[in-house]
Amino acid sequence: MKVIRFGTKGQERPGLWQADGVVDLRTLFPDIPDVDETFFKQGWLERLASLNVPGQPCSERWGAPLARPSKIICLGKNYVEHAKEGGFEAPATPLLFCKTPNTLNGPFDPVLLPQSSGQIDWEVELAVVIGKQGKRIAREQALEHVAGVTVMNDVSGRQAQFADSQWFRGKSFDNFAPLGPALVTLDEIADLHQLKLIAKVNGELMQEGSTRDLIFTIPFLIANISEDITLMPGDVISTGTPAGVGIFRDPPIVLKDGDEVECWIENIGSIRNRFVAR
Ligand code: ZN
């Protein structure tokens, strides 16, 4: 099942993305909540799994497939080759940081270049969405807490990230987390740890990796993070990026007004965002 949100910004409605188009869930279930904590708590994913309704062509904008996650937890240096390209050792324990919810952006929306920081960069990442609240989740039960997966571009303001000595600002500028195109449930994913990921800038291949190269696997991360941080339905864990970001290239490449970044992951699809100056 592929859950989406569509409609104008701030007024998105939940939908299902099928081969023949989009199912507008509000027309079938007028009281269905937005895709947020309540949606998962009320068991809508399970209720929708048996739905058999044809889709319709949809020309409306798509929003991020999630509304208002309580947190977006990200992983730094979770692929060996990416750690190496930055001149770092692979970490011995997960390196966690957060992006704030104001970063959330639609899968095809523009990304505004910030005024206060330059060196804007891309990072294709597999993002895991939590469906069931949990604390001290055992590795063996971890996937029972996952609603599905999606694609995230962990857009990064390198100038702020490096100058500030910590990552909060450079990672949390408005709309720096394009997400989508859909929340894909795990029954549609062949193997979470064998998914190809690609990032292209203006059509040119920049990143090409596979989730088989994750240093810390998804069950390990869920167990590790939830030891002392309660994971809530709708929370996002973005699992880190493979090698090939712009800043560590020789010469470095940074995004400029008009550039388009496409992030693609096998079994999920593509998000495409144009970067625009204010
Ligand atoms: Zn990242």
Image: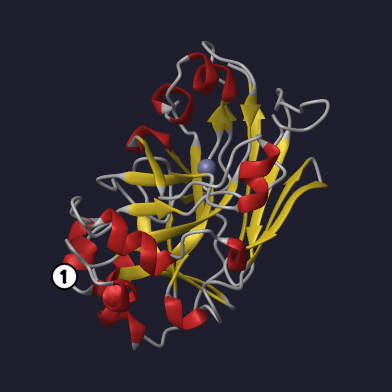
Marker count (numbered) = 1
Q: Secondary structure at mark 1?
A: loop
Q: Specify the farthest residue to the top.
A: 116
Image point 16% across, 61% down: which residue? 135
Q: Position of residue 154 (x, y in %)?
A: 53, 41
The quadrant where residue 156 appears: top right
Of the pair 272 and 98, the residue shown nearer to us: 98
- Give residue 178's position: percent from left, percent from top: 51, 44
**Relative to residue 84, is residue 113 depicted above or below?**
above
Q: How is the image coloured?
A: secondary structure
Left or right, residue 75 beside residue 67: right
For the residue with label 1, is its CB less than 8 Å from the closest atom of ligand 1?
no
Q: The N terminus lies in which quarter of the figure?
A: bottom left
Residue kind at label 1, given as amino acid type: Gln
Q: Position of residue 187 (x, y in %)?
A: 45, 83
In-image side of 157 versus 165 (left or right)? right
Say if 59 sits above or below 252 in the image.
below
Say left or right for 243 vs 97: right
Regarding residue 186, the answer to whether it shows in the image is: yes
For the residue carrying disc 1, how many other residues have a C-alpha within 10 Å: few (<14), some (14-19), or many (20+)? few
Residue 271 vs residue 98, the one in the foreground: 98
The picture quadrant where one finds residue 57 is: bottom right
Q: Which residue is mark 1?
A: 42
Q: Quadrant of the C terminus?
A: top right
Residue found 83% across the figure and 25% down from its top: 251
Who is closer to the viewer here, 122 or 4? 122
Q: Is residue 170 above or below residue 41?
A: above
Q: For residue 254, what is the image quadrant?
A: top right
Residue 35 appears in view = no
State the image coordinates of residue 146 (x, y, percent, origin top left): 33, 69
